[in-house]
Structures are given as C-alpha cells and as structure tokens.
Image (cartoon, rainbow, N blue to C red):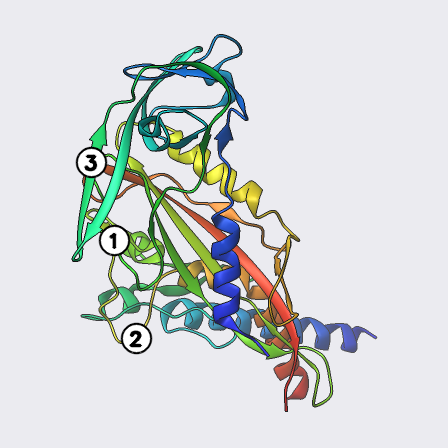
Amino acid sequence: MRREIAKVTAMAMDVFVDVAAEAHRSIQSGSELTGAPGQPVDTGNLRASWQLSFPTPTLASIDTNVEYAEAIEDGVGPHGPLTLRSAVGGFHSVSMAAANMQRVADEMAKRRAAG
Amino acid sequence: MIDSVAIQLAMRARALTLSVVTTGAIAMSATATGFARSAASFQTDGFWPGMELRSSGFANAANNGVGLVTKVTALAIDVTMLSVTNANGVRTVTRSATVSEAAGGARTLSVGLPSFQAWENIGIIPEAGVPWVEEQFNPGPNAQVTIGPNGDIEALPFYWLYVHLPNGTGLTVARYADALIRLFPPRLALPLSNGDVLRVRSDVGPSAKQLQNSQPGFAVKLVEIPLRIRTANSI
C-alpha cells in the first residue's frame, strides 16, 4: 500500500512539473492545448524573458521582468492599441494559458498514465 | 462544426444590446445646453460625464441622436450632440448644441455601446473626446471531449472588448466595463444560426482588467469574456 502511495505521489509530482512546463510553453511560444498564441517576436527579448521556476516543491512560478510584457499581454501600449507586426505570437497568452489550465492538466495526466 | 465567424458575430450582436444606463421613457425638456427633467434624478439613474448617450422622442430632430455628456446634476444633463458623415472615405464629426424644446413625455436618454466601433480588421480613427470600443477574438483550442468518431468537439474561444473613454472622466469607463460583465454572465447561452449553443464559461468567468492609459486623450478598460462551445464532430 505504501509503495502504491509513493508511486501515485511521484506520478502526481511528474504531472505537476509537466503542467508547469506546458504553461510556460503556452505563454512563451504558444500552445495548441490552451490556444495561447505565445509572445510576439522582434528581438526575442520578451519571449526569452519568461522564466519557469519552482520556489517550493509544490509551487511553480512563471515570470518576466520585461516592463512592456503587460502591454503585450493586454495589447495596449502608451500610445494606444498595439498592432501586431510579428509573424508569430500575439496578445493575451497569459490569460488564455491561465483559463485553460484544466485542459493542460487533463492532457498531461493522460500522457503520464499512458507512459 | 465549429463556426468561429458565427461565434464572433453572436458576441458582437450581444454587445450591441449593452445598456449602461437609461432614463426609460420619461417627461423631459431640451435646453440650449442639454436636457432637463422635473422629477427623479439623472445622477441617481447613473449618468456621468464622459458617457456617450442616445436621445430619442424629441420633436426637434436636432435633439435626437448621439451626444457626449459633459455635466450631470440631478435635474439637468449637459450634452454636446454629435453627427457623423462619411463622404468619399472622409469622416466628418460635427458637434452641435441642443435646441430648446418644451417638456414632453415618452422621451429617453440611454447609454449603450459607444457608436465608434473598431470591429476586428475594421479600424477606426478615434475622435478626440468621443468614447470608442475595440474588439478582439481568439477562436481558442479545439479538442474532442467525448468518445467515438462523432464525439463532441469542444472549443474554448475568447472575446475581448476594449472600452476607451476620454481622459479625466474618472471611473466612468469602469461603469461601461461592469455593464458589459453583467451583459455576459457566466452560463449565458447564445444560440448560433447553425444550432450550436455558445456559452459564457463559469469556471473562469468574465472579468475586467485594470484601468490603463490608452493613446493620448484616452483611458481604456479591457473586458475579457471566456467562452465554451460544443458541437458534434463531422466526419
């Protein structure tokens, strides 16, 4: 019984890491699971700035220190609505990733269960 | 089958029914600066400077149409009327004053979705001091969620409305945002022409982001509406 509990706990941790990684990918590069477009690319600075970390074993954090990240997320800059000029990426990646995390969790669990 | 055009048009049609505030059909007069009433209160109704209103029911055509609210007291509301013409691709916005008119019944002032509307891929040039709204849409991810070859396909679209109001109008733009969120409550069902039913999600409800500066002269609030739709797979 203890062995089974340990196995399930380990699998849950694996799924947690997979979910965090997919959330990071969703925000940074886009995801077919969440529909997030990912970050638009000019120099690549914003896309590369989104970092995934694990402050505790059960907490994942996805952060950026780029000051214009919020403008890109909302599609609103200091001079008004932004026009997307990049061939990749788009706006609202964080919102879409966050809203569709259940789909990500379901899919990551399914993949782990399938081995 | 998922029809993203039908989804976006359904959301747009619903947004166009927005009612932020209305007097209902009441007795009102027109003055040289706006409109006046002898009972109840424009302030209590919820009118605020910066709003764009529609007036109707007045005998003088100059008092019916779209106007900008500049001042609100209990019994009087100052309004600058707007008329917009388009000739050979050139838009002209003319501002005019209301015309004095004796009180009469069945007259209405109402505030809805701003008349300057930048739908996707149809831009507009904002007019100084005139509220405007902008739309964005993402069809979202699709996935088969029930088993079998003809199992349901579920899409999770997102719809955004940006409400831009002139600088210096305080929280008026937040009143528009709140009204939009009430217009799209969780679980709202919007039947589409193909028989599918689009719903506002309840697991992640509609929300408004913080007030931000927009282009010079405007502040903006973004309203985010997450959606869900299921349709049978077509093979």
Q: Residue at x 25, y 53 (%)?
A: B124
Tag 1–tag 3 contact (CB < 8 Å): no
Where residue B139 appears, as percent x and y from the top left, is 48, 69
Q: Nearer the viewer, mark 1 or mark 3?
A: 3
Residue, disc 3? B94
Where residue B109 appears, as percent x and y from the top left, is 45, 27
Give the structural element (helix, strand or loop) at label 2: loop
Which quadrant is the C terminus of chain A positioned in?
Answer: bottom right
Which quadrant is the N terminus of chain A positioned in?
Answer: bottom right
Q: Nearer the viewer, mark 2 or mark 1?
A: 1
**Can residue B140 be seen?**
no
Which of these two is toward me, B165 or B99?
A: B99
State which chain disc 2 sits on: A
Q: Name the amino acid type tagged 3.
A: Thr
Check residue B99 in the rendering and tell me which mark sits there, or answer none.
none
Q: What separation in Å lies between label 1 and label 3 (alpha carbons)?
A: 17 Å
Which of these two is toward me, A114 or B62?
A: B62
Q: Name the amino acid type tagged 1.
A: Ile
Q: Residue at x 63, y 50 (%)?
A: B186
1 and 3 marks on the same chain: yes
Q: Name the amino acid type tagged 2.
A: Val
Give the structural element (helix, strand or loop) at label 3: strand
Is residue B47 shown above or below A12?
above
State which chain disc 1 sits on: B
Which of these two is toward me, A98 or B147?
A: B147
Where on the picture, by quarter, is residue B171? top left
